Amino acid sequence: MKAHLAFLDETGMLMAPLVRRTWAPRGQTPILRQRTNSHKKVSVIGTLTVTPRRNRVGFCFRLHPDVNIDTEKVEEFLSALGRHLRGPIVLLWDRFTPHKSRRMNAYLAAHPNIHPEFFPPYAPELNPTERVWGYMKLNPMANDPALQLDDLTRSTRSHARSVQRKESLLRAFFKHAGLPLRLR
């Protein structure tokens, strides 16, 4: 079947930054300011997509500030994805609770152009979208303390859009996931 491949995953970007190495003048300890006791986050739902001819790779995402991803959010994302990717979609995703809900099963039954397939249990290393989140958290967003939720949302959107424009990086996520896709 000639269909788009979509690898769906969700994550949360927290206001507490991941601290990596930093530089400072000799004798001056670097100070990284952040809000304490803040449990605010930006939930992100996203998918890496592959065209039916396997010649283009893309990245689609949606941000949800200070909200948990639930079945309704997944349905909204899949509806937008269906409008963006014309034709059938083979959807590969993990066993996240909203993906297995009765409501999701009803949604998928009403949308026969989406063909869901689950990754094996406890195998995040097979999902290349997991690598997108890891890259964003460990590289452009490391040492980037957001003091306000709007700042975190803006930063997450900016870095995700940057990843969208780097097709060679998107292809690398597939390569490192070890998936036998023959991307041209």
Image (cartoon, rainbow, N blue to C red):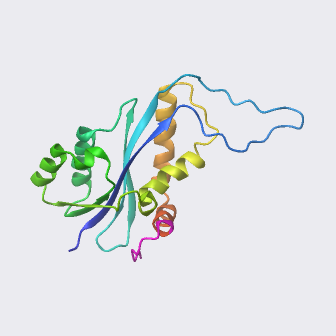
| Residue in front for this viewpoint, 97 or 129 | 97
| Residue in front for this viewpoint, 56 or 106 | 106
Q: Main secondary structure of the magenta part?
A: loop
Residue 24, image quadrant? top right
Residue 127 image point, x, y percent? 41, 60
Residue 79 image point, x, y percent? 21, 48
Q: Please state if 85 lies on the left or on the right of 166 as rendered.
A: left
Query: Is residue 183 highlighted in magenta?
Result: yes
At a point 46% along the width and 41% down the height, the residue shown is: 157
Residue 177 image point, x, y percent? 47, 66
Q: Please state if 32 lies on the left or on the right of 165 as rendered.
A: right
The residue stretch that appears in magenta = 176-184
Image quarter (top left, top right, bottom left or bottom right) of the C terminus: bottom left
Image quarter (top left, top right, bottom left or bottom right) of the N terminus: bottom left
7 in relation to 103, above or below: below
As drawn, the residue found furthest toward the right would be 27
As drawn, the residue found furthest toward the left would be 110
At a point 46% along the width and 32% down the height, the residue shown is: 41
128 in relation to 149, above or below: below
At a point 47% along the width and 27% down the height, the residue shown is: 40
Query: Is residue 5 highlighted in magenta?
Result: no
